[in-house]
Structures are given as structure tokens and as C-alpha cells.
Image (cartoon, rainbow, N blue to C red):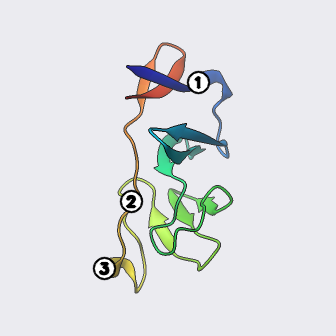
């Protein structure tokens, strides 16, 4: 079943909006024309990511400065091999909306 999250016309670089999907909170965001849906939780210590710094496909947690690649979900830097990846959901486009299948 398609679960709509946003209208395409509302998306722009810098867009951020929280959504609850299957009991988890996800952050829908756009950076450099790409739209992502990631769990609003840093895998390092569960800090929320909705106020994280985002630049050129990288999101940096404000709590401890750990950076993650938005496309792969992998952490960068010295702790990279010891951290889980960001959890993300595959986006589905339906006409003028973006959402997920649940």
C-alpha cells in the first residue's frame, strides 16, 4: 500500500520533514536534487538527525560530528567500520507525490 509523504512541488534543496512509518520516525530530506528517507536516528548514540548538517550528500550528526553518506548510509572517518549504516527506506514516486510502500 502506497503511503504518501510529500508533494513533489514542495520538495527543494534544504527540505526536511519528519514522518512516522511503521512506528519509526524517519526524516524525508532533499540535498543537491536528491531525495532521501532515513531513520531520524544516528547509529552511533541514537541522537536525532533532523537538525544535522547536510552538505553534498553527507549528513553530519550534531551530537558527536560523525558523518554518513546519504546514498550508501555508511559512516565516514575513524569509527566507520564499527558503526551501523543509516537505516533508509526506498522512496516510491506516484504521480505528483513521493512516498513509501508499506
Q: Residue furthest bottom?
A: 78
Q: Residue furthest top?
A: 95
Q: Is residue 76 above or below residue 49?
A: below
Q: Quadrant of the N terminus?
A: top left
The kind of secondary structure element at disc 3 is helix
User: Real-space Cα distance between discs 3 and 1?
Assistant: 35 Å
Total number of numbered labels?
3
Q: Report helix, strand or loop for mark 2.
A: loop
| Corner quadrant of residue 84 | bottom left
Question: Residue 73, labelled with which disc?
Answer: 2
Q: Which mark is residue 8?
A: 1
User: Which image quadrant: the C terminus?
Assistant: top left
3 or 1: tag closer to the N-terminus? 1
Residue receiving disc 3: 81
Q: What residue is drawn where x is 42% and y is 20%?
A: 2
Distance from disc 3 to disc 2, alpha carbons, whole Å, reads: 12 Å
Amino acid at each position: 500500500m502506497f503511503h504518501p509523504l510529500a508533494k513533489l512541488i514542495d520538495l527543494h534543496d534544504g527540505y526536511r520533514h519528519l514522518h512516522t512509518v511503521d512506528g519509526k520516525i524517519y526524516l524525508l530530506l532533499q540535498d543537491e536534487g536528491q531525495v532521501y528517507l532515513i531513520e531520524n536516528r544516528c547509529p552511533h548514540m541514537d541522537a536525532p538527525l533532523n537538525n544535522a548538517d547536510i552538505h553534498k550528500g553527507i549528513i553530519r550528526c550534531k551530537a558527536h560530528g560523525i558523518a554518513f553518506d546519504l546514498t550508501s548510509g555508511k559512516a565516514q572517518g575513524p569509527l566507520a567500520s564499527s558503526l551501523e549504516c543509516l537505516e533508509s527506506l526506498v522512496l516510491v514516486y506516484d504521480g505528483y507525490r513521493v512516498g513509501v510502500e508499506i
